[in-house]
Amino acid sequence: MSRHRLSGLPSGRRTKLAMLALWVVIAAVMGPLALKLTDVQDNDSLGSLPAGAEASRAAARAEAAFPEPDALVAVAVYVREAGLTDADRAKVDADRAAFAAYATGGSVAEPVPAADGKALLLSFQLAGGDDEQAAAVGPVKDRLAAQTPDGLRTALTGSAGAEDDLTDAFSGLDVTLLLATVAAVAVLLLLTYRSPVLWLVPLLTAAVASQVAGGIVYLLAKHTGLSVDLQSQNILTILSIGVGVDYALLIVARYREELRRHEDRHEAMAIALRRSFPAICASAATVAVGLLCLLAADQPATHGLGPVGAIAVVATFTAMTTLLPAVLVLFGRWVFWPFVPRFTPGIEGQDVAADHGVWARIARLVGSRPRTVWLGTAAVLAALTFGVTNLSVGLPGDETFTKEVGSITGQRLIERHYPGGTLAPAVVIAAAGTAAPVADAARTVDGVATVGEPQRSADGRWVRIEATFTTEPTGPAAQQALQRLRDAVRTVPESQALVGGDTAYEVDGDAVTSRDNLVVIPLVLAVILVVLMGLLRAVVAPLVLLASVVLSYAAALGAAGFLLDAMGHPRLWSAVPLQTFLFIVALGVDYTIFLMTRAREEAAQLGHRQGVLHALTVTGGVITSAGVVLAATFAALTVLPMVPSVQIGVIVTAGVLIDTLLVRSLLVPALAVHIGRAAWWPGRLSHAAPRPEVPAPTERVATHS
């Protein structure tokens, strides 16, 4: 079906009603399913590794050889820096007796004292099923905090404490995130449209798109095994609203202009949609295909984010190009009140600069000194990249939350008074016949504090040996010790040794992340380059644009480096660089697509230089508004209590603003003017004879791409 016929469906006098009815049915079916999306979340993928990683293979072998009930482990820690008193020990004994009611087997092991005499540990598995275990954590915490002698510090950690803290932290936050996003976007739309009514239409349409996308993801997760976690569900919400409002701003801006030139609002919408559709379609395709490139990643959290995000983008694109136009046409011109666009015969004679004063002045600056502008802008972007030195990759487990929670407090207390790896020893799974030499090899490793006695599996094939590191288990020293431990146990003939545990997960996670970066980043860049070449029918301009978005990402990472360092979160979660690269590059190139497709259209009529400057003039306002709105939606991620979410929010917000305000507004148009017609090589525009600069006809004032 041609673009002309498609644009007529939501804008037709009768077909608009059919389109609305269709969306009512879709929303009625998908809305209830979207509400069930949390039921199919698998948040284990947020920290998991691919099955081929050694840590994963070690865990699988241990689970098969040493089957244990899938129970949460509660670790209660008691600390007095001046040394434990008799009253403290009485408190521990009383708690131990009380905890027996919640423990597997009805008993709790003797407390484990610290060598310095300042701490005691009680560790036990919670009894019952998942619900019973979750319900038991509250009473355990209450008992731990009750009747505590003055000066004695207590905390609950272990998997029981960590899971309870995570549940508390995210209780109701899906609603908080949604409200924060909607509030930010609503304020910006009110400022943009200056209408008490119009801002509701794109926002509600984006909300419908989000629900439809959520329903589709739920069905795929339930019936096809699609992985969805808390992070990908949050990104789904952000993308639906942010990208949806972006597309709405472009369509509404073009529709407003066409209403001034056409008395029939149906005709005005058909033209507006037809002329804005190619760039919006190219934008959606770029982002969706870019997200699908994440399927090439091995990291489960990154791999699963790809299809969820792509579904959100496609659903949003469909809603914004079908539902939004139908609603706008149905409401008529009054939806723009109090600034209602009136049909004005002869509008073609008006001056472009009169409607786009600020952007006309920016275009004159770019046109008069293009080389100075792009060199100066590039220098600013290069200076921002120095902030990258404030960042490092590798987020310690005790820095996952934005504020300290009980389980983190407990971990730090234990690290202060026990060997660094007490709570997270390395686990060696080896052939039973090599138990003694494997244990001896482990004891020779520099950085290993203690090596436990080998535990034989029920079938007699395997042994499990725990090795405790001298330092904090996720730090660089422990990671180096883990590598030495792996090398040492592998030298034992026929040991078939695998080393797992928390430190192993960190080491293997870093390796997987490095591999994903090397594979996915070039793939994303190649996809974007192909899309730009097909859209602009050129080679030079797409290469320049690709280089500009890469520079934009580097500048965003640097700017975020200054901000995150000031916020106290400079150590990035391992998946953050790749995920933010995708969002900044794929979303940032949107604005360049909107600008350059318009520039190509204008260049065919006005000549290259005047066409680029005119495109900058007439697209500047609406694209800047779209960028600010998208940045605000990602900034809403900073309300979440998880450091990775805050890091993604800060980096992508910085990237979108940099791309909108500097790259698309100054760097790209200045480069295009400086390069000249060669930017369109080998397309026909590169061979067109130079045209004298003429005033741009006002009919081109309308913002479209």
Image (cartoon, helix red, strand yellow):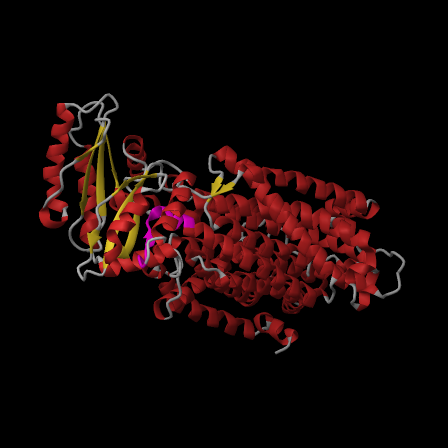
Residue drawn at (84%, 55%), measured in percent from left and top?
A: 695
Q: Position of residue 595 (x, y in %)?
A: 70, 56
Residue drawn at (71%, 40%), measured in percent from left and top?
A: 379
User: From the viewer's perspective, is 422 left or right of 607?
Assistant: left
User: From the viewer's perspective, is 486 left or right of 440?
Assistant: right
Range covered by the magenta-colored residues:
494-507
User: From the viewer's perspective, is 512 left or right of 502?
Assistant: right
* 566 over 196 or under it: above or below: above
Q: Position of residue 25 (x, y in %)?
A: 42, 71
Residue drawn at (82%, 59%), measured in percent from left and top?
A: 677
Q: Nearer the viewer, residue 248 or 346?
A: 248
Which residue ends up furthest to the top in the rendered image? 82
Looking at the image, can residue 343 be seen?
no
Q: Nearer the viewer, residue 73 or 178?
A: 73
* 70 over 642 or under it: above or below: below
Question: Magenta stretch: residue 589 in it?
Answer: no
Question: Magenta stretch: residue 497 in it?
Answer: yes
